[in-house]
């Protein structure tokens, strides 16, 4: 259990120090985390709505920060190139995220064009049923994305790395709220870059 906790701690620290220098990104992660908690609660009585919130708000706000605000040049604080950070990233680096989001967009277009998903489900009728169905599809995509990368890590690295990463992803909303709750205030007072982004280990 100690080794698992250390692996989880290391993954969280690497994620923070390598990919969260920008206070806009941190603030968007706070928004993402809060909306993810709402989605978690909705899983028990409206999973389709959880899927809609999880992708349209939580995932979108989270990835906007990474794609558009986080610097992609040489990381002077950690003495690492962006290419190196992408290569060693445990979870979804930007290339993998592009693929995952392409699947997300393609699923929406496919369901709109083919209401029965080629016979896999009952065709929806009207906008309300479309939203229910697309929310369910998005929820499946999220679950499969988590399971796929975890299994991939089981084989390419080891079982503990995969389990720790899956645990990190599922508990990130709680951790991000604790870590980035003051990011919007700091953004107003300090500008876009967190001066202590890499000095919070411990």
Image (cartoon, rainbow, N blue to C red):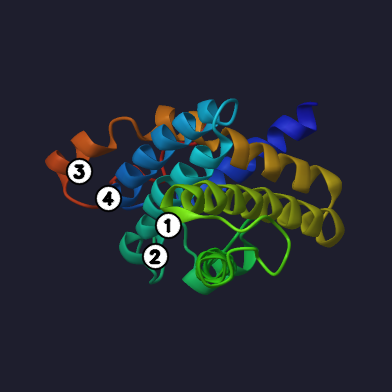
Residue at 56% across / 65% down in the picture? 111
Query: Do labels 1 and 3 touch, CB within 8 Å?
Result: no
Q: Mark 3 points at which residue?
A: 187
- 9 relative to 192 in the view: left or right: right
Q: What element carries label 2?
A: helix
Q: In the rendered structure, which disc, 1 or 3, sits on the residue that comes first in sequence?
A: 1
Residue at the extreme left of the image, as rendered: 189
Q: Residues within 10 Å of mark 1 (few under 14, many from 20)?
A: some
Distance from Cα at disc 3 to Cα at disc 2: 18 Å
Mark 3 vs mark 2: give the one in front: 2
Q: Which mark is residue 67?
A: 2
**First in sequence: mark 3 or mark 4?**
4
User: Can you identify the residue that label 4 sits on?
Assistant: 24
Sooner in the amino-acid sequence: mark 1 or mark 4: 4
The residue that disc 1 covers is 63
Separation of disc 4 and disc 2 at Cα? 12 Å
In the displayed structure image, the side of residue 55 where residue 110 appears, left or right: right
């Amino acid at each position: 259990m100690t080794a698992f906790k250390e692996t989880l701690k290391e993954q969280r620290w690497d994620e923070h120090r390598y990919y969260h220098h920008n206070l806009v990104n941190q603030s968007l992660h706070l928004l993402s985390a809060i909306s993810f908690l709402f989605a978690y609660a909705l899983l028990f009585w409206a999973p389709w709505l959880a899927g809609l919130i999880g992708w349209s708000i939580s995932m979108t706000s989270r990835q906007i920060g990474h794609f558009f605000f986080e610097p992609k040049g040489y990381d002077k604080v950690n003495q690492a190139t962006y290419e190196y950070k992408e290569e060693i990233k445990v979870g979804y680096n930007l290339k993998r995220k592009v693929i995952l989001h392409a699947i997300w967009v393609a699923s929406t277009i496919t369901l709109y064009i083919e209401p029965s998903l080629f016979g896999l489900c009952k065709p929806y009728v009207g906008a309300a049923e479309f939203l229910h169905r697309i929310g369910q599809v998005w929820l499946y995509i999220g679950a499969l994305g988590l399971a796929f990368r975890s299994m991939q890590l089981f084989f390419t690295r080891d079982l503990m790395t995969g389990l720790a990463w899956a645990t990190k992803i599922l508990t990130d909303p709680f951790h991000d709220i604790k870590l980035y709750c003051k990011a919007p205030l700091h953004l107003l007072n300090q500008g876009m870059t967190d001066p202590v982004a890499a000095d919070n280990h411990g």
